[in-house]
Image (cartoon, rainbow, N blue to C red):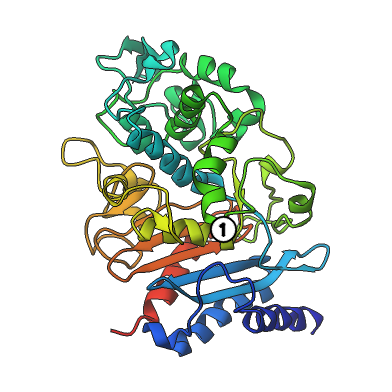
Amino acid sequence: MKHQLLIGIASYLSISSFALGAPLPTATPASQGFNAKNVQAIDQFFNDEIAQNRMPGGVLAVAKNGKLIIYKTYGYQDKKNNIPMSFDTVFNLASMTKVMAAAGAMTFYEEGKLQLSAPVYQWFPEFKTMNVGKVENGVLTQMPSSKPITVQDLMRHTNGLTYGARANTPVHQASLRSSAEAATEFTGPDFIKRLSTSPLLYEPGTAWDYSFGIDVLGLLQEKIAGKRLNDILNERIWSRIGMKDTGFTLSDSAKKRLAQPLEIDPITGKKQKIGIYENSPKFDCGGSCAYSTAADYIRFGQMLLNGGSLDGQRILGPQTVALMTSDHLGTQIKNNVGGTEPGRDGYGFGLGVAVRKEKGLSATNGNIGDYTWNGANGTLFWVDLKEKLVVVMMAAAPGELRKEYRERINALIYAGLNQ
């Protein structure tokens, strides 16, 4: 009874506080073409999952036509310590960091300081000579790459700098495991030095493979600006559009508001954790290491949907946002995006975001041209241009269950759109 009561309180507070400190102008769901009955179905989904101890809690923010129509908290920020979820709860974004780091890079692109076709070795000579790994009969050999990694390759994951944790081939074993793990082990310069000695999984520019590209891109921005990526993104994006709780370093206040996962993975029954909580990164890894709130990230998403501006602050030009959120794989580059999860079939990839190319194929609903990326610790985000829709869901749910939630929340949102 106590558990059910707390869920109810959290939902009630979210409704009664809806217009207080909201990150965007508010409107009723019905006024923006969203079926109010489906809001109840969304509430029921979260409450059921929390009651079944499958997730600790979450924050959902949905904007339609520039108006915030759903903004709710559910369950717990920290279930073990009986702390309810709040609107200012802070979450590790994991790979949703990549979208912001890519947007930061595009500000340098607009200033003529960052050519997409430029070779990365222009900033990091360590990448001048790279080898491509070949495996025959279980034996790894390396051959010199025939082309350099470009800035565009970093942003669209066609660089070959694969995540070692994604497979168990000899090439993967020779690479670093993940962005967060690498950042907690190496400083920025040491990371570049170590990564440049890893064999590439593919020739640059030939295949999409999830990679360390955005981590290198973040350090490249630091080379250009002569300052930390945190300061770059704060000056160029976060502070300008009111993202006050977003950054790579947690303040004492933010640490108290940090969302905690369930101690046990509901699928595997094994203990789970969010590793970056325990080991502070040694550099601002653009691939995984930032923190934010649902309020901040919905403003970032709305800025992109608006074509690069929000509340009179121009971050990027409309044509730049269109370039960033268009497919950059085409027909000549091997498209492995669908291999990440069922919801990615039918997608290509732009500069930091997956971009839908077909209405069908994907296990998730949407429209051609929608763009998205999610975080491994339970966060999700997408923008649908046709529906003028931005969706952000934050949760501390690092297990495989997060992929199921992406499909189910997607279905609940689109079911509510009145045609």
Q: What is the secondary structure assignment of the residue under circle 1?
A: helix
Q: Residue at x 70, y 68 (%)?
A: 86
Q: Is residue 324 left or right of residue 67?
A: left
Q: Which residue shows up at 72% across the image and 54% down it?
A: 258
Q: Quadrant of residue 416?
A: bottom left
- Taking the view exactly as shown, the residue that stands out farthest to the left is 331
Residue type indicated by callout 1: Asp
Q: Which quadrant is home to the C terminus?
A: bottom left
In the picture, measured across the screen, residue 4 lies left or right of residue 112, that is: right
Could you tell me if residue 354 is visible in this image? Answer: yes
Where 306 falls versus 102 (above or below)?
below
Residue 34 position within the rendered picture, expressed as x and y whole percent measured from the top left: 40, 83
Q: Quadrant of the N terminus?
A: bottom right
Residue holding disc 1: 296
Residue 242 in percent (x, y) is at 57, 56
Location of residue 307 with respect to 183 vertically, above or below: below
Q: Is residue 209 visible?
A: no
